[in-house]
Image: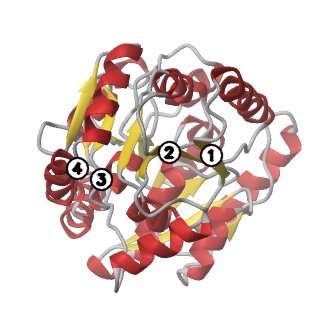
């Protein structure tokens, strides 16, 4: 089975992580051959090239430039006519709106994968609505509940993302090297947040909680994630101003966009991302669990399907005091951190074992192809 995945590729977040993993893990399900079509050449494209699955370049495409859409559609049509694909997956409404009609014109089975929560009101969602797929795949049961806003009546299947974690020959050495590079004492308790710089990811809530912990010794916070868009640059400036106002500049470090997130997680002690808006799924939570970190997050959205009492703590949305109390407890209690950390890899594997998830995806796509024949 040859599967073409279509996406924009200009940023880097959850979808990009998924597509990179599909390329890297393709040997786990050799019956399913993934290929990729992208409109922008960035970190995702570089990852795919490194994984020896170079993407098809459909060209820079923007709705503000209609001619770029026509060119990209023409390139995709030529690709579909010249290559034998069994099925096409459009990741997100932007991709569905631009390319869904081309896939339909070539009479290929079309799957829509929903990485976000559709409300059915955005102009992109209205464009995507006009191209009904054969199947919808969502990344969580939480996301699935909202699909009636976009494709009512279309079958929807929940498939957790196939995620794994690299193996390190010496975790102690990796931890020491990272801390040395970042100027962090070996005995410091590191609280890490690794995510896109988006407001709903809860950075402000985390910083407000940390400001209540100034009397607690021995902790430091690493914020991982760089500004990729103008609004994110503005947000980053606001966060830096916030730590200055709270008097915690010496304990909160912004390390920007990094390609060594697994190593950073191994070198940390607690993962905290207290969302103020619901996470559709939360790859970063699963990665932290694989790394053996207790995860602290907000009780909303996809996080509630990932984090349980065996591996982390859920706090009430917007509860700064509750968040601070939870972090204080974990900072002060290494035995509890160890207990939760030991449960993390087990929980992550239960949800996102890549072999199981890829084979389930293969089975689902096989059913769609058979029904479309």
Q: Secondary structure at mark 3?
A: loop
Q: Which residue is mark 3?
A: 293
Q: Are marks 1 and 2 in contact (CB under 8 Å)?
A: yes
How far apart in space, not on screen, are marks 2 and 3 (Cα)?
A: 15 Å
| Residue where numbered disc 2 is placed | 220
Which residue does the image show at 68% across and 47% down from the upper left?
226
Numbered marks: total: 4
Q: Which residue is mark 1?
A: 253
Kind of element beneath mark 4: helix
C-alpha separation, residue under disc 1 versus residue under disc 2: 8 Å
Front one among 269 and 350: 269
Q: Element under label 1? A: strand
In front: 196, or 63?
196
Q: Earlier in the sequence, mark 2 or mark 3?
A: 2
Q: Earlier in the sequence, mark 4 or mark 1?
A: 1
Q: What residue is at 40 percent from the left and 59 percent from the top?
A: 187
> Is residue 193 found left or right of 79 in the rendered image?
left
- Residue depicted at 56% across the width and 66% down the height: 36
Quadrant including the C terminus? bottom left
Expressed as whole percent of the image width and height from the top left, the position of residue 82 reads 61, 75
SS label for mark 2: strand
Task: Look at mark 4 in the image and give the residue it sits on.
Answer: 334
Mark closer to the chain start, 3 or 4: 3
Image depth: mark 2 or mark 3 in front: 2
């Amino acid at each position: 089975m040859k599967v073409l995945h279509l996406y924009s590729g200009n940023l880097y977040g959850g979808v990009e992580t998924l597509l990179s993993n599909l390329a890297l893990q393709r040997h786990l399900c050799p019956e399913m051959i993934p290929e990729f079509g992208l409109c922008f050449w960035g970190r995702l494209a570089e990852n795919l090239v490194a994984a020896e699955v170079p993407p098809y370049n459909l060209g820079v495409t923007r709705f503000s430039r209609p001619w770029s859409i026509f060119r990209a559609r023409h390139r995709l049509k030529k690709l579909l006519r010249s290559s034998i694909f069994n099925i096409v997956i459009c990741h997100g409404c932007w991709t569905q709106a631009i390319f869904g009609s081309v896939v339909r014109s070539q009479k290929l089975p079309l799957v829509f994968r929903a990485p976000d929560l559709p409300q059915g009101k955005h102009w992109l969602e209205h464009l995507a609505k006009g191209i009904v797929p054969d199947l919808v795949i969502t990344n969580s049961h939480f996301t699935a509940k909202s699909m009636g806003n976009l494709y009512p009546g279309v079958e929807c299947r929940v498939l957790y993302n196939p995620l794994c974690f690299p193996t390190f020959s010496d975790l102690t050495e990796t931890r020491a090297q990272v801390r040395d590079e970042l100027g962090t004492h070996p005995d410091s308790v590191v609280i890490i947040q690794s995510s896109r710089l988006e407001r709903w990811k809860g950075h402000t809530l985390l910083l407000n909680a940390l400001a209540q912990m100034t009397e607690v010794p021995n902790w430091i916070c690493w914020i991982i994630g760089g500004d990729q868009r103008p609004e994110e640059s503005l947000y980053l400036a606001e966060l830096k101003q916030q730590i200055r106002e709270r008097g915690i500049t010496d304990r909160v470090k912004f390390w920007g966009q990094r390609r060594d997130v697994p190593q950073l997680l191994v070198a940390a002690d607690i993962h905290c991302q207290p969302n103020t808006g619901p996470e559709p799924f939360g790859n970063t939570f699963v990665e932290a669990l694989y790394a053996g970190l207790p995860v602290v997050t907000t009780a909303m959205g996809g996080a509630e399907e990932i984090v349980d009492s065996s591996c982390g703590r859920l706090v009430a949305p917007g509860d700064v005091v509750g968040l601070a109390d939870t972090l204080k407890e974990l900072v002060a209690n290494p035995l509890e951190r160890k207990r939760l950390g030991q449960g993390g890899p087990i929980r992550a594997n239960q949800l996102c074992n890549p072999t199981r998830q890829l084979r389930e995806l293969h089975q689902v796509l096989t059913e769609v192809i058979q029904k479309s024949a």
